[in-house]
Image (cartoon, coloured by chain):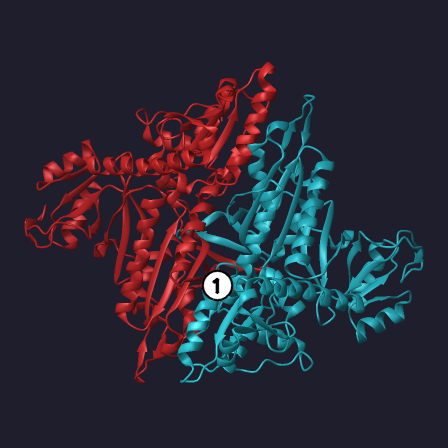
Chain colours: A cyan, B red
Amino acid sequence: MAERITPRSEDFGRWYTDLVIQGQLADYSPVKGCMVIRPNGYAIWERMQQVLDNMFKETGHVNAYFPLFIPESFMKKEAEHVEGFAPECAIVTHGGGEKLEEPLYVRPTSETIIWSMYKKWIMSYRDLPILINQWANVVRWEMRTRLFLRTTEFLWQEGHTAHSTFEEAEEETLKILEIYRKFAEEYMAMPVIVGRKSEAEKFAGAKHTYSIEALMQDGKALQAGTSHNLGQNFARAFDVTFQDKDGSVKHVYATSWGVSTRLIGALLLTHGDDSGVVIPPRLAQTQIVVIPIWQEATRQPVFDFTNRVFRQLQDHFSVKLDDRDQYKPGYKFTEWEMVGVPLRIEIGPRDVENNQVMVVRRDNRSKTPVGIDELVTRIEQILTVMQQEMYQRALDFQKANTHRSDNYQEFKRILEEKGGFIEAHWCGSAECEEKIKDETKATIRTIPFQREIEAGNCLICGKDSDDGRVIFAKAY
Amino acid sequence: MAERITPRSEDFGRWYTDLVIQGQLADYSPVKGCMVIRPNGYAIWERMQQVLDNMFKETGHVNAYFPLFIPESFMKKEAEHVEGFAPECAIVTHGGGEKLEEPLYVRPTSETIIWSMYKKWIMSYRDLPILINQWANVVRWEMRTRLFLRTTEFLWQEGHTAHSTFEEAEEETLKILEIYRKFAEEYMAMPVIVGRKSEAEKFAGAKHTYSIEALMQDGKALQAGTSHNLGQNFARAFDVTFQDKDGSVKHVYATSWGVSTRLIGALLLTHGDDSGVVIPPRLAQTQIVVIPIWQEATRQPVFDFTNRVFRQLQDHFSVKLDDRDQYKPGYKFTEWEMVGVPLRIEIGPRDVENNQVMVVRRDNRSKTPVGIDELVTRIEQILTVMQQEMYQRALDFQKANTHRSDNYQEFKRILEEKGGFIEAHWCGSAECEEKIKDETKATIRTIPFQREIEAGNCLICGKDSDDGRVIFAKAY
């Protein structure tokens, strides 16, 4: 962990990679495009899983597991879906020493295999809704990969629900979107724009795709979670019908939704600094590290005091004690800053004398002496304030980097010089959207739910945009 | 859930399949050899994961994630390993629309990919030990599959640790074996025999393999968990060395260990009965279901009382309320018995009058009226006793079905007529072991740690067996 992290100002891309590699969050693997998630990174994912899984269960969802492999013929049943995914699949052609009669696709997402099962399980309205989620690995072949952000294999959750009406499916889609927003903002301290995707950007096979979009420190956008109303597309492709209360037979309505280990990348790009990772308190698997500072003469009193403090903290926080003999305090500080533990507690001989500890916040390095009698309540306060301030700082950044433009030349200049979100008018046509993408690499990130009703003219064709501005950005 | 379960006495194999399918624990998938784990089954796995994960973390292990794909050349680096696993692998030959230069094996186990990474991470004794576990899916091509017990894809955990001495690796191997024993006996209420595998039965690439072996209700054995001391085999294959304290350079010592979704099958085969699954209280995601019983006239008082009871229980147990209007109590009883919830609480008008509830145990159907004032303490007692008695019942079964034999004809007759574990003498040679396997399909399940020191003669060749009896059985 001794190497220097490239400063963000010097090379943002290098900074990110240094963070991941030196923080031991992930590593390159010998398999092209696949990463190894190391324990420091996986601990973040475990905590994300835990929080999201609780939120899914509280809203009536249950977990299940479907096969990794999908028969080629299944992939081909939904026309848009196969077009979107087939080119990026890994394909198993041999198993058990023999060539397979039908190739198997390693799942890039599981709609097809799951809807083939729902056909067996759904007969009547009484079997609905089905609210199933799956935690799994998926594979999408990538040529240009970046650790956590774009890898051939990644981990995610994918929810797949079945409903008797379009309205109920739409309600489910939006309920999950709200869970994603809440998770991003209240746990990751990462503000997001909530909205709908354009036709061009929606999921292959969906009626509507909704997403949460975040802005990274380098001014690029990152899609952090998506929720799709699939209408009856997959039910039609797999002929999944149900008998409704009135005796009529209808195709089932579907949703699907997911977030992935990409969120770890989003977390780093939102909060990381030149010293390493910064994890918000509510998402940290280790919230506090306690580091005693002693000379040979003061060893015993410092250790006794430290152990007392540590035991007291253990009942209320997830806390680690770093009492390794072979490393100096400064080395330990650097190491724990690198991995992003929210609070460091320093305990030296002077602190023992004063019956206090020194609490240091990871995000802004602020130091607060805290008396041993008020240890737990004060630390709870400090963690709460830190969580809020991290969110506020990221929100201030997002606002400061959201621009408005009504002129395509200016739009291009903003993109070039500043990046960030650009609010602009768009006529709604795929042609204008594509022209902007081709010429600037910026895409419509989202048609936000919350936007001013404002008449305006499309950046490209000048036609009316009745509903207000959409958000453009270059994206990860 | 209305269909009849085939009684065990009629057809044990059918009974098992009925249990899994009608209990909606798993289902056959359209992908050959792969199953779908349905929410009822996955809930058991989640609870197993939770308990084991805590036990691993308490002993210093951390989780990580390694790629699904393994380059063919890696598989071939450890000679025994490739011989053992390559024939049962699924192989990816195409990715992203192109033929791959080197085929990728879908991991059947991850020693090779993990040790290729350990080579990057281990330089010095300071980097040791590495105590990593992974929760993942693996694929081993199977011709004859059975839900949970033998499927082409399954879920498991695989621990992979690295140490500086053989002794430390051996200590780790045994520490994990003890965790497996504890989990099987204290949570699954499934008694196991702890011991070492013969050379023929050990893991491909291991020095020693240890296992826990359980006996199922039909008299067949089931290997429920294995822990391997790999010596320096994988470190040599991947040239992983470290500089020791004295400056010398040595190959690293390794262990690996795992349990899988097969444990769900073991649970069913140990405790299931002709009404369905029986889950021991400490392993149940839902411990109690509350079922109100009312007529139209008594609806209101019964529901008020039920809600009061339900709220009180919620603070102490994981409990569900089944207040569905459209089903009769008897139907609900059958349904909850099928999925194995440990306790059912019935509340009728008479109970409301007497200020009590009726508690019914799933395993033996015993009914206990419990006064509302002592609800929590009494139910805690009932759950504790139920857990103990389920274990004791399984242990009694195991003992009653463990036979001794010193005569090969008798040995074959016992196998044929009764099944179960057979304790017999064996000279230690692979030839005699193989002869028994070929002629009877029984294998040496384990050389138990706890066995009487007893001289005897090998069943086959008559030579001395110095150390005592080993355990033979036909196995799943």
Of residues B325 and B234, the one nearer the viewer is B325
Closer-to-camera residue (A355/B231)? A355
Pinpoint residue A442: horizontal percent, then vertical percent.
78, 65
Q: From the top left corner, tell me how far across and down residue B317 is, in percent.
A: 48, 39
Q: From the top left corner, tell me how far across and down residue B434 is, in percent.
A: 18, 49
Q: In percent of the image, x 90 and y 52: which residue is there?
A: A453
- Find residue B171 and report its horizontal and vertical position in percent: 28, 64
Is B177 displayed left or right of B456 in the figure? right
Q: Specify the amino acid type for callout 1.
A: Gln
Q: Residue at x 74, y 64 (%)?
A: A395
Q: Residue at x 74, y 70 (%)?
A: A219
Q: Residues within 10 Å of mark 1 (few under 14, many from 20)?
A: some
* Residue displayed at 6% across by 51% down: B455
- Front residue of B476/A287: it is A287
User: Height in image: A297 above or below A36?
Assistant: below
Please give the residue where the numbered disc 1 appears in the rendered image. A312
Please name whichever residue, A355 or A5, is drawn nearer the observer in this view of the structure.
A355
Give the chain of mark 1: A
Residue A429 appears in view: yes
Relative vertical location of residue B94 with respect to residue A57 in this rendering, above or below: below
